[in-house]
Image: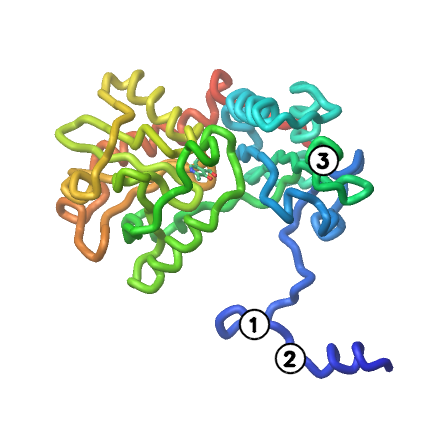
């Protein structure tokens, strides 16, 4: 045994909290990489890829519920717009990408899945610093569905803290390009954990509420809905809330939401492909209104999940 192996062998296994974990374990799923469908454990990327070294990547996440994609077209639109804005090219068109995503889900067998398509700047064979020399890399994968809020939190509402961290401004990174610039959001999350909350909202550059790690936020006041307009990802679930409100005759606008206005709301909820519409019943340790999940939120949550069976909003996966 050489020195390195001996050192490795003497180390205790890694832990998360008080749990021992296998660092080589992966969620059960299927990835598409370099023209092949692979188990997640075999989908590996070069450490020289700019996606990894510089967060130079764009991605989109769509979910499958009861064996059906939800609003796949909107996710494909956003992904292809992001590629264009970042001047990335992939050897697949929209229909090809839709087929690849279908295949990942079908091969995984998951009927409830979190499905991601992504493109990194890639690496150049000479490790050039010129992004134009890099060969862009498209990848996709399907793993089990995951949610920002667990079953208990969906029932009683999330406990959120508002961090003073500021979301990267749109003049620096265009938020309509779905991206991995998350250091601000992750710092916000740690602020929230330190304050006993379950997740975080962070601010825009004017001090208004922006968004959280993987979700947009809505305020309901006197029956009207508002959600931050600037410095946020235009989420597909956020868009879905606007569409549901239009169907239901509810007024919903994109406008500045101050911290004080959010705390004084009748209802608050957050939205994400990872979990849908999720209630918030506590902010910075104080209840929102009576601290219970509100009626507008509950109604929108029910409608949102009903739409998952509607062929206008969803499409069937063909499993082998
Ligand atoms: N905001 C950020 C920063 C996100 O990363 C996400 C999703 O990952 C969202 C909002 C919600 O977007 P969507 O509803 O399209 O999942």
The secondary structure type at the circle numbered 3 is strand
Callout 3: CB less than 8 Å from ligand 1: no
Q: Which mark is on residue 293?
A: none
Where is residue 99, by image quadrant?
Answer: top right
Give x and y (percent) for residue 199: 36, 52
Tell whether label 1 touches label 2 (CB within 8 Å): yes
Give x and y (percent) for residue 70: 51, 27
Mark 2 or mark 3, whichever is nearer to me: 3
Quadrant location of the N terminus? bottom right
**Res 160 seen here:** no
Using residue 229 as the reference point, say whether residue 137 is left or right of it: right
**Front one among 52 and 248:** 52
Give x and y (percent) for residue 78: 53, 24
The residue that mark 3 highlights is 137
The image shows residue 302, relative to residue 81, as above or below, that is below
Q: Residue at x 70, y 42 (%)?
A: 30
Quadrant location of the C terminus? top right
Q: CA distance from mark 2 to mark 1?
A: 9 Å
Using residue 252 as the reference point, say whether residue 187 is left or right of it: right
Q: Residue at x 64, y 75 (%)?
A: 13
Q: Residue at x 40, y 37 (%)?
A: 169
Q: CA distance from mark 2 to mark 3?
A: 36 Å
Mark sitting earlier along the chain (1/3): 1
The residue that mark 2 highlights is 12
The secondary structure type at the circle numbered 1 is strand
**Res 255 seen here:** yes
Q: CA distance from mark 1 to mark 3?
A: 33 Å
The residue that mark 1 highlights is 15
Q: Few, some or many C-alpha atoms within 10 Å of disc 2 (few <14, some 14-19, many ≥20)?
A: few
């Amino acid at each position: 045994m050489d020195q390195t192996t001996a050192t490795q062998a003497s180390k205790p296994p890694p832990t998360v909290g008080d749990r021992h974990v296998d660092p080589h374990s992966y969620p059960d799923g299927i990835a598409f990489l370099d023209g092949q469908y692979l188990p997640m454990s075999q989908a590996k990327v070069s450490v020289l890829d700019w996606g990894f070294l510089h967060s130079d990547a764009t991605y989109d996440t769509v979910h499958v519920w009861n064996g059906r994609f939800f609003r796949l077209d909107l996710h494909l639109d956003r992904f292809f717009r992001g590629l264009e804005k970042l001047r990335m090219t992939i050897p697949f068109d929209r229909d090809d990408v839709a087929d690849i995503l279908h295949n990942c889900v079908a091969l995984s067998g998951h009927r409830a899945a979190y499905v991601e398509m992504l493109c990194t700047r890639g690496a150049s064979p000479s490790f050039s610093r010129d992004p134009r020399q890099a060969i862009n890399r498209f990848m996709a994968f399907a793993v089990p569905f995951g949610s920002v809020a667990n079953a208990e939190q969906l029932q009683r509402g999330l406990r959120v803290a508002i961090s003073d961290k500021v979301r990267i401004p749109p003049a620096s990174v265009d938020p309509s390009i779905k991206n991995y610039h998350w250091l601000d959001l992750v710092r916000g999350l740690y602020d929230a954990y330190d304050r006993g909350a379950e997740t975080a909202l962070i601010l825009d550059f004017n001090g208004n509420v922006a968004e959280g790690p993987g979700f947009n936020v809505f305020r309901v006041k006197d029956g009207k809905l508002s959600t931050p307009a600037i410095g946020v990802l235009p989420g597909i679930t956020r868009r879905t809330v606007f569409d549901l409100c239009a169907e239901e005759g509810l007024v919903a606008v994109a406008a500045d939401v101050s911290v004080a206005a959010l705390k004084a709301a009748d209802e608050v909820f957050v939205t994400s492909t990872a979990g849908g519409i999720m209630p918030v019943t506590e902010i910075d340790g104080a209840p929102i209104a009576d601290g219970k999940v509100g009626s507008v939120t509950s109604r929108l949550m029910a409608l949102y999940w009903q739409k998952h069976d509607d062929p206008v909003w969803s499409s069937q996966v063909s499993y082998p």
